[in-house]
Amino acid sequence: MYYGEIKNCDIANGEGVRVTLFVSGCTNRCKNCFQPQTWDFDYGQPFTEETQTYLLELLEPSYISGLTLLGGEPFEPENQRALVPFLRRVRSRFPQKTIWSFTGFVYEELLRPGSHPRCEVTDEMLSLLDVLVDGRFVEEQKDISLRFRGSANQRLIDLNATRRTGALCRLPERTQS
């Protein structure tokens, strides 16, 4: 797997101050994607052991709320296979921090047997996430006022509540003060 960028102290891609990893490779190719260069699976740098160590170091400070995965597309099967072992390490080392992932696929696609991008590690990847921001960016539904997403069709899914209740649960639009 390759990645295009790592951001430290990101406040735009999830709750709190986060470390974000922009993976490379995407077959969705949404019209007017804000990072079309990341469609290429070989864009950027290889996701090495050194990269993983660096990310773990960035996650160390107490003011960092967690990790966010973006793309490209984290749920492309080859990316899932590379990310799951790393996410296990993050979960083990930082159980109090949250892990978010953005995906152009919808949650139901990720669960449907035989669908792209579902593979042998999809269920485990989902189990390691706290929040999933799902759905392709749709230019005609673009709304810059939305929290953590670009178009109205995209959802903020609370995966912990979804697992607890057995029904899809969304995060509230705004956090309570």
Image: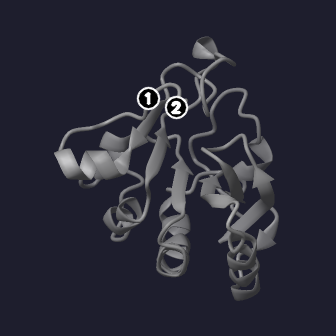
Residue at the image position 53 percent from the left and 68 percent from the top = 78
The answer to which of 13 and 74 lies nearer the viewer is: 13
Residue flagged by tag 2: what amino acid is it? Thr
How crowded pointer 1 is (Cα within 10 Å; few <14, some 14-19, many 20+) is rated as: few
50 is higher (above) or lower (below) than 31? below
The answer to which of 84 and 171 lies nearer the viewer is: 171
Q: Please give the count of numbered marks on the rendered protein.
A: 2
Is label 2 in contact with label 1 (beta carbons under 8 Å)?
yes
Q: Which residue is mark 1?
A: 172
Residue 97 in sight from this viewpoint: yes
In the shown orientation, is residue 125 left or right of residue 10? left
Q: Position of residue 30 (x, y in %)?
A: 63, 33
106 is higher (above) or lower (below) than 137? below
Q: Position of residue 159 (x, y in %)?
A: 35, 49
138 is higher (above) or lower (below) than 18? above
Q: Which residue is mark 2?
A: 175
Secondary structure beneath label 2: loop
Residue at the image position 61 percent from the left and 50 percent from the top = 26
- Cα–Cα span, label 2 and label 1: 6 Å
Q: Which mark is residue 17?
A: none
In the shown orientation, is residue 134 left or right of residue 39? left
The answer to which of 163 and 153 lies nearer the viewer is: 163
Secondary structure beneath label 1: loop
Q: Position of residue 68 (x, y in %)?
A: 61, 55
Q: Position of residue 138 (x, y in %)?
A: 58, 22
Q: Quadrant of the N terminus?
A: bottom right
Q: Residue furthest front?
A: 177
How crowded pointer 2 is (Cα within 10 Å; few <14, some 14-19, many 20+) is rated as: few
Residue flagged by tag 1: what amino acid is it? Pro
**Residue 122 sits in which quadrant?**
bottom left
Q: Nearer the viewer, mark 2 or mark 1?
A: 2
Q: Quadrant of the C terminus?
A: top right
